[in-house]
């Protein structure tokens, strides 16, 4: 599934890329596009496409969009990938492989932060250290590509309440608490870096959301 917010005109090309790639590999894939209150009309490009479902809602944040898409999905393996095109179909398949092959219940993409700006790299390092200290997750939790075995989703989403910046952390932490670990960690590199939205306010909101979610 693809959570989307004002993704512009490239969504159709991205979905075609996924469809062509996975069809060539013999995979049966249903695509769920979740529009998190976009105002640019970008998701309308894929409305009515065979094998593509479009869910629309008010802007509640990426966490709510991902939760809605994963709940709606039906396949044995459910995955989400950012709708901005930062990761391609080859990366999605690579992250799904451990779950498809039965070696993990949860698989995540882990980035090399050396390619980020100094400010983003510093913030990522602080965030990662707090995630490791407070949640016991000593790997990159924020890359926008993850895969789950179907058996994980209902119990994880059942115990999950956060819709803020800590969505990924809470899901991964809960999955491990429920015995669905260890998480497969797949090295990934974004093929392009989205425009930075990092600022002091958003950074403080992210840290507060992370802090208040401890132990829940």
Image (tube, grey):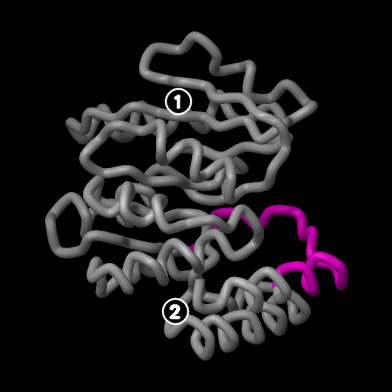
Q: Which mark is residue 16?
A: 1
Q: Which mark is residue 33?
A: none
At 76% across and 54% down in the image, what residue appears? 195
Q: Picture coordinates of residue 9 (x, y %)?
A: 68, 26
Vertical relation: 176 (above or below) 32 = below
Residue 160 in view of the camera? yes
Question: 216 or 1: nearer the eye?
Answer: 216
Vertical relation: 129 (above or below) 177 = below
Is residue 133 rendered magenta in the image? no
Q: Secondary structure at mark 2?
A: loop
Q: Please tell me whether mark 2 or mark 1 is closer to you in this view.
A: 2
Q: CA distance from mark 2 to mark 1?
A: 31 Å
Q: Secondary structure at mark 1?
A: helix
In the picture, the quarter occupied by the N terminus is top left
Magenta segment boundaries in residue numbering: 189-206
Task: Look at mark 2 in the image and give the residue it sits on.
Answer: 139
Is residue 200 rendered magenta in the image? yes
């Amino acid at each position: 599934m693809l959570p989307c917010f004002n993704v512009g005109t490239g969504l159709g090309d991205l979905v075609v890329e996924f469809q062509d790639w996975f069809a060539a590999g013999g995979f049966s894939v249903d695509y769920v596009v979740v529009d998190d209150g976009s105002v640019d009309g970008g998701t309308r490009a894929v409305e009515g496409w065979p094998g593509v479902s479009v869910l629309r809602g008010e802007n509640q944040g990426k966490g709510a969009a991902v939760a809605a898409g994963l709940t709606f999905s039906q396949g044995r393996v459910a995955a989400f990938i950012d709708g901005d095109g930062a990761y391609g179909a080859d990366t999605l398949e690579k992250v799904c492989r451990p779950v498809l092959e039965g070696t993990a219940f949860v698989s995540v993409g882990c980035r090399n932060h050396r390619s980020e700006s100094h400010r983003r790299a510093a913030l990522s390092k602080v965030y990662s250290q707090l995630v490791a200290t407070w949640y016991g997750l000593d790997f990159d939790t924020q890359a926008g590509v993850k895969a789950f075995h179907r058996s994980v989703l209902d119990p994880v989403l059942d115990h999950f309440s956060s819709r803020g910046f800590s969505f990924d952390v809470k899901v991964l932490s809960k999955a491990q608490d429920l015995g669905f670990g260890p998480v497969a960690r797949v090295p990934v590199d974004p093929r392009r870096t989205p425009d930075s939205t990092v600022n002091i306010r958003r950074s403080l909101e992210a840290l507060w959301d992370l802090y208040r979610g401890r132990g829940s």
